[in-house]
Image (cartoon, rainbow, N blue to C red):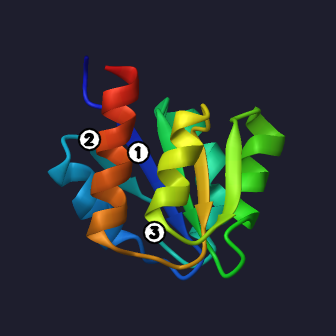
Amino acid sequence: MSKIIVVIGDRLGKGQNVGKGVEAAGGKAIVISGMAADMKLGDTMNKENADMGISFCGSGGAGAITAQSKYGYPAQYGMRSVDEGLTALREGKTVLGFGFNDSEELGRRLTEEFIKLRG
């Protein structure tokens, strides 16, 4: 299996730590730069033919809902923990919306789980 591509969009222009976790787990991270990057998640996933998208904002929903509405990506949003994200992946979701949590652990564990499920 080739490297999975994970797009990361953060409302505040962050996401670099999640990207490090994705890369550490063997994935390719694409961190969207700039403010309101979460709202570009679906467009970037579509352009890059990404396998998974991770969105961050205060509510944990805006970017994930937009990606789901515009492109039909199965999404789960409003999440606050890594375990919620793992459960969403196991349920077939590919776009995950979280409250702010720019941590390497989140990127690493989600990518490891995605690889395990799709491998």
* Observer-nearest of 82 and 6: 82
Residue 64 vs residue 81: left or right?
A: right
Label 2 crowd bin: few (<14), some (14–19), many (20+), radius 10 Å: many
In the rendered image, the vertical position of residue 66 relative to residue 36, given as above or below: above
* Observer-nearest of 107 and 2: 107
Residue at the far right: name it. 69
Q: Which residue is mark 1?
A: 6
**Of the residues shown, which amino acid type is indicated by label 2?**
Gly
Q: Which residue is mark 3?
A: 33
Q: Would you say the residues marked 3 and 2 are in contact, meaning their CB atoms lie under 8 Å apart?
A: no
- Residue 104 seen anywhere in this rendered image of the structure: yes
Q: Work out whether mark 3 precedes mark 2 in sequence or the reverse, and give the earlier one.
A: 2
Q: Which residue is mark 2?
A: 27
Q: Quadrant of residue 14?
A: bottom left
Residue 119 vs residue 11: left or right?
A: left
Residue 31 vs residue 90: left or right?
A: left
- Residue 44 seen anywhere in this rendered image of the structure: no
- C-alpha distance separating marks 1 and 3: 14 Å
Numbered disc in front, either 3 or 2: 2
